[in-house]
Amino acid sequence: MIDQALVHDFNQSRIQRHKKDFEFLADQLDQKGFDIEQIVQQLAEFAVAIPSWALGTGGTRFGRFPGGGEPRSIFEKMEDIAVVQSLVRSAPRVSLHIPWDEPDDPQALLDFALEMHLGFDAVNSNTFQDQANQSYSYKFGSLCHTDAAVRQQAIEHHLHVIEVGKQLGSNAITVWLADGSNFPGQLHLRKSFERTRDSLIDIYSRLPEDWRLFTEHKPYEPAFYSTVVQDWGSSLMLAQAMGERASCLVDLGHHLPNANIEQIVARLITAGKLGGFHFNDSKYGDDDLTTGSIHPYQLFLVFNELIDAQYDGGLTEAPAYMIDQSHNLKDPIEALLQSVMELQRACARALLVDRALLSGYQEENDVLMAEMTLKEAYETDVRPLVREVRMRKGGSTDPINTFRRSGYRKKVNQVRTASSSYVPPQSL
Ligand SMILES: [Mn+2]
């Protein structure tokens, strides 16, 4: 994929500059009472999954402008994810979508993944579109449908997705439902939710012992009047109705404008129901833009809640992290590299919040100093820190430049020629 000698040479060409920057930061942090080595270790543990649908050029309902060299199969997608991982070293797992990327032979895919040093994260179901050979349509919903036979078909699909996931070593399933209505009166608001809840309880009752189930909320689209799982409250009700191993997944783009997402995260932590994240960014709606491109401070504040809860024991289980974006204009691999780096930076900044100091200011109601304590961490240039972490793990100090220098896109462009029939799905 990417020649490790190239990564090494690239890092070496910048090592003197990097060492100076890293030492400068270490000294700055030392004065604030932080041990940079400890931060490096903590940051090295951060990992985010790459979804199987993020490697092709995305599109909107108005069109798609495919780039060259798009992966034509799940195996080629895995190759691209391995490229991302080899450069950033914080993306070791793949989140598979069934049926878009359903393997004919799960064992062969697992063997290939191991060869690529990749594992599998949560698997994703799909009842938002009809598949070939299915008996009933999801036009009017799946797990919420008025017809028990449609609900049963959707339940069985989820059980099938879990079966495939089991063969791949996955241990979680994410359920995002497009179910909802476009017009007042179309759906009985209470009954549709209750049917969804009961369908999920059925799926949950057959979840393997060591598996988790995540419900993902979304306020609108494709349903434009009411989505059945429209907000975190609905998602929480479902997770609570199912049981201990069910929790809520927060997609940063699945909120109405100006929602306080970090506070939603805090509430879910208090409820013991924060399951995971789909990272992306948004200006208006579910825009699926690059993580941290529009609201980097919000991303930091989300990580601030996570790190805070990690320290005080509020987070009992590590949330499942995944990038969920649509790469319509950027090279998907480059956008993913950029996103992982953005997440590494947000996590690093959150690790640099002086929590004792912040807590003191909060207790004293010193509004300004409390806010400044967060800003102090946020405004720290953590780039030398994340470069160091990537380099120590065998990745690149500058993943995007290394990727461009590798000529990988040009190479696959020549090999992956028959791509005209491949239409990558849009992001969820
Ligand atoms: Mn999502």
Image (tube, helix red, strand yellow):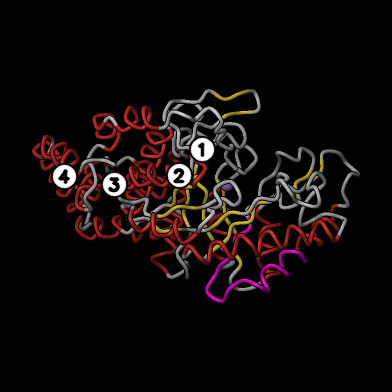
Quadrant holding the N terminus? top left
Sooner in the amino-acid sequence: mark 1 or mark 3: 3
Q: Is mark 2 on a helix, strand or loop?
A: helix
Cα distance between the residues tagged 2 and 1: 9 Å
Residue drawn at x 63%, y 54% is 125
Tags 2 and 1 touching, CB below 8 Å: yes
Give the residues in magenta. Answer: 198-215
Question: How dense is the environment of label 1, judged by Cα within 10 Å: few (below 14), some, or many (20 and up)?
Answer: many
Q: Is mark 1 on a helix, strand or loop?
A: loop
The magenta stretch spans residue 202 = yes
Task: Using the numbered discs, state the Cα–Cα distance from disc 1 to disc 3 in whole angstroms.
Answer: 24 Å
| Disc with the residue nearer the chain's start (4 vs 1) | 4
Residue 362 point in image, percent of width and height: 44, 57
First of labels 4, 2 by sequence position: 4
Which of the marked residues, 4 or 3, is nearer the chain's N terminus? 4
Q: What residue does disc 2 label?
A: 299
Residue located at (11% from left, 39% from top): 12
Q: What residue type is labelled 2?
A: Leu
> Quadrant location of the C terminus?
top right
Q: Residues within 10 Å of mark 3 (few under 14, many from 20)?
A: many
Residue kind at label 3, given as amino acid type = Ser
| Residue on which the image places disc 4 | 22
What residue sits right under mark 3 in the picture?
Answer: 86
Tell whether 420 sits left or right of 235. left
Q: Residues within 10 Å of mark 4 (few under 14, many from 20)?
A: many
Q: Which residue lies furthest to the bottom in this view?
A: 209
Q: Which of marks 4 and 3 is in front?
A: 3
